Image: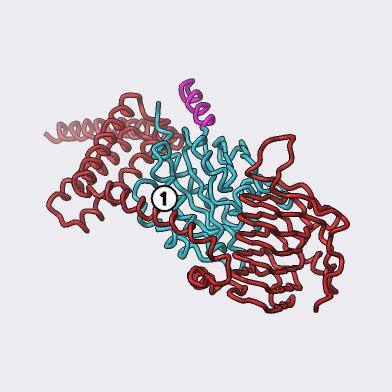
Chain colours: A red, B cyan
């Protein structure tokens, strides 16, 4: 019995040893597999796997579907809100799909696209049902456009000093910008401290003389009648609209002239000047001068040696070869040379 | 890497987008285009017609069309609508007097069927000017919040300094890429 036990013990320990060895080998094998798996996974990220994509995609899709189905019966505001949220989430889902295109199989891709398309159409239907406002908005807009296209009609009157009515609106919107408006029969001088690097706007001036002694970054002139406006070097563009019977002088990078008649421009322009809807505009090289002009030129960064004053493009006259009848060069004999006689 | 993967990657590299840049005249469209492309901006003339630039950015090939904004050119804008992926609407933030004009032109564009699929990026340009309105003010003036038909975003920028140009274009690319580059 004792012996038998001993043998049994021995047998037991023998079996144990074998089992242990087996265990070890198994362990090693598992580790090896693990290692290989890891090596493989380090090359392909978890997110780049079909299953991950599949579950994440479906989860989000179900969420959006639920969101949409919860929509019916809700009041308008929540409805709009929900629809917008759904739009956003569908967009994100689409992006997710696009990002995953590289590692998905054709079949998965088709499936996902079909699902997205279905969502999109459901959303479109719901939007159509819930907010059939679209046509309405369209009508409102055209109405607004009609109104606006009517307003320019009385605008030519605004050029005359008597039409102060049209003046007010423009003046109010422009209040925060640097500049001045609604003046007549005055001489205005601004120094460099006031206008340097500013965007200057002058509107509704009649019979005024304006001297801007400095270098603004842009200059806008609108509704100018019978004025003489002289300005230092403008570092970018000058924009003129509805100006008549005036004399202007400035250096600038670009000049855009609109709805202007019978006006003389003494110009230094480093790129190009254009006119549109203009008549009787005439050009001559910039000849006005004031003490700090040189300094202001360097502040503006304009090239003093490049002046394209006589290369004017007319947007209403695109016939090549024949010069536009809307502008001309001022003959040398008629050019103004003495600027400050009346000061 | 299997052959199929290589092919797919190559295909991805060919991704091409067409961007249309519009806005009133003097908004700074050409300046934005040239600045973005790293060219000199001091010699730019008012655009008499249009400019096209093709450039590579973030692996995308961008065809940018910059069409003149003068009143007499606006009726030709529609010639450029076809197959536009992104619309860049440029606003002169300092030009308060024409904001209403600007709003009308934009809302008319958004009704265009051929632009229906395009993403809208609004550049509130000229933020370097002291009198420029903030992008919030522009957003309100142009009633952007009423736009439900297009994905849109407004970004304040300065074409002269180059500030925020990249931010805007990157947003636009992301949005377009999310829409159009699905599998074939």
Of the 4 image quadrants, the one containing the C terminus of chain A is bottom right
What is the chain letter for disc 1?
A: B
Does the stretch in magenta take in B49? no
Which residue occupies 74% across, 77% down? A191
Where is residue A292 drawn, in percent x and y? Answer: 83, 73
Residue shown at the point (59%, 73%) measured from the top left: A181
Residue A323 coordinates in the image, percent (x, y): 74, 41
Q: Is residue A125 left or right of residue A140?
A: left
Outermost residue to the top: B3
The image quarter in which residue A251 lies: bottom right
- Range of residues picked out in magenta: B1-15
Q: Nearer the viewer, residue A206 or A181?
A: A206
**Quarter holding the N terminus of chain A?**
top left
Q: Is residue A202 above or below residue B86?
A: below
B163 is higher (above) or lower (below) than B62 = below
- Name the element at disc 1: helix
Q: Which residue is mark 1?
A: B107
Q: Position of residue B171 (x, y in %)?
A: 48, 49
In this rendering, position of residue A87 left or right of residue A305:
left
Instruction: Residue B88 in the image: state x and y as whole percent.
Output: 51, 47
- For this rendering, which residue is in front, A159 or A94? A159
User: A276 or B37: which is nearer to us?
Assistant: A276
The 10 Å Cα crowd at callout 1, few under 14, some 14 to 19, many 20 or more, is some
Q: Is residue B7 magenta?
A: yes
Q: Is B145 positioned to the left or the right of A194 in the image?
A: left
Q: How many marks?
A: 1
Q: Quadrant of residue A256?
A: bottom right
Q: Main secondary structure of the magenta part?
A: helix
């Amino acid at each position: 019995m004792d012996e038998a036990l001993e043998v049994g013990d021995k047998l037991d320990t023998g079996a144990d040893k074998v089992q242990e060895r087996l265990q070890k080998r198994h362990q090693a094998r598992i580790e090896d597999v693990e290692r290989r798996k890891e090596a493989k996974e380090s090359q392909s990220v978890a997110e780049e796997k079909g299953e991950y994509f599949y579950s994440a995609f479906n989860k989000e899709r179900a969420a959006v579907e639920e969101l949409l189905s919860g929509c019916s019966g809700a009041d308008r505001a929540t409805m709009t809100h929900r629809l917008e949220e759904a739009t956003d989430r569908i967009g994100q889902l689409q992006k997710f799909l696009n990002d995953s295109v590289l590692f998905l199989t054709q079949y998965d891709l088709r499936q996902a696209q079909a699902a997205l398309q279905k969502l999109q159409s459901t959303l479109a239907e719901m939007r159509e049902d819930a907010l059939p406002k679209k046509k309405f908005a369209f009508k409102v807009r055209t109405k607004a456009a009609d109104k606006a296209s009517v307003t320019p009609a009385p605008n030519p009157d605004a050029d005359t000093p008597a039409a102060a009515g049209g003046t007010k609106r423009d003046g109010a919107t422009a209040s925060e910008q640097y500049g001045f408006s609604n003046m007549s029969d005055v001489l205005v001088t601004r120094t460099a401290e006031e206008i340097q690097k500013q965007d200057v706007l002058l509107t509704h001036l009649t019979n005024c003389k304006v001297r801007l002694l400095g270098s603004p970054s842009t200059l806008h002139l609108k509704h100018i009648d019978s004025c003489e406006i002289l300005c230092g070097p403008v570092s970018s563009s000058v924009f003129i609209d509805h100006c008549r019977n005036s004399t202007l002088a400035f250096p600038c990078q670009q000049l855009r002239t609109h709805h202007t008649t019978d006006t003389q421009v003494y110009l230094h322009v480093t790129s190009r000047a254009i006119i549109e809807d203009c008549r009787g505009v005439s050009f001559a090289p910039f000849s006005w001068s004031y003490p700090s002009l040189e300094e202001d030129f360097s502040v503006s960064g304009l090239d003093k040696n490049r002046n394209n004053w006589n290369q004017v493009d007319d947007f209403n006259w695109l016939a090549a070869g024949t010069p536009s009848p809307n502008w001309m060069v001022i003959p040398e004999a008629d050019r103004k040379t003495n600027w400050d006689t009346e000061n | 890497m299997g052959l199929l993967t290589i092919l797919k990657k190559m295909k991805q590299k060919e991704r091409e987008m067409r961007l249309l840049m519009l806005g009133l005249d003097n908004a700074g469209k050409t300046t934005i285009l040239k600045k973005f492309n790293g060219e000199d901006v001091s010699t730019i003339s008012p655009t008499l017609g249009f400019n096209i630039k093709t450039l590579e950015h973030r692996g995308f090939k961008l065809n940018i069309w910059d069409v003149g904004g003068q009143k007499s050119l606006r009726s030709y804008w529609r010639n450029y609508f076809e197959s536009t992926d992104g619309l860049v609407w440029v606003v002169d933030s300092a030009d308060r007097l024409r904001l209403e004009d600007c709003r009308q032109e934009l809302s008319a564009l958004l009704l265009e069927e051929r632009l229906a699929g395009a993403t809208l990026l609004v550049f509130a340009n000229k933020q370097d000017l002291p009198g420029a309105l903030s992008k919030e003010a522009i957003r309100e003036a142009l009633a952007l919040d009423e736009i439900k038909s297009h994905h849109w975003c407004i970004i304040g920028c300065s074409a002269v300094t180059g500030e925020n140009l990249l931010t805007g274009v990157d947003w636009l690319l992301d949005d377009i890429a999310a829409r159009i580059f699905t599998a074939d």
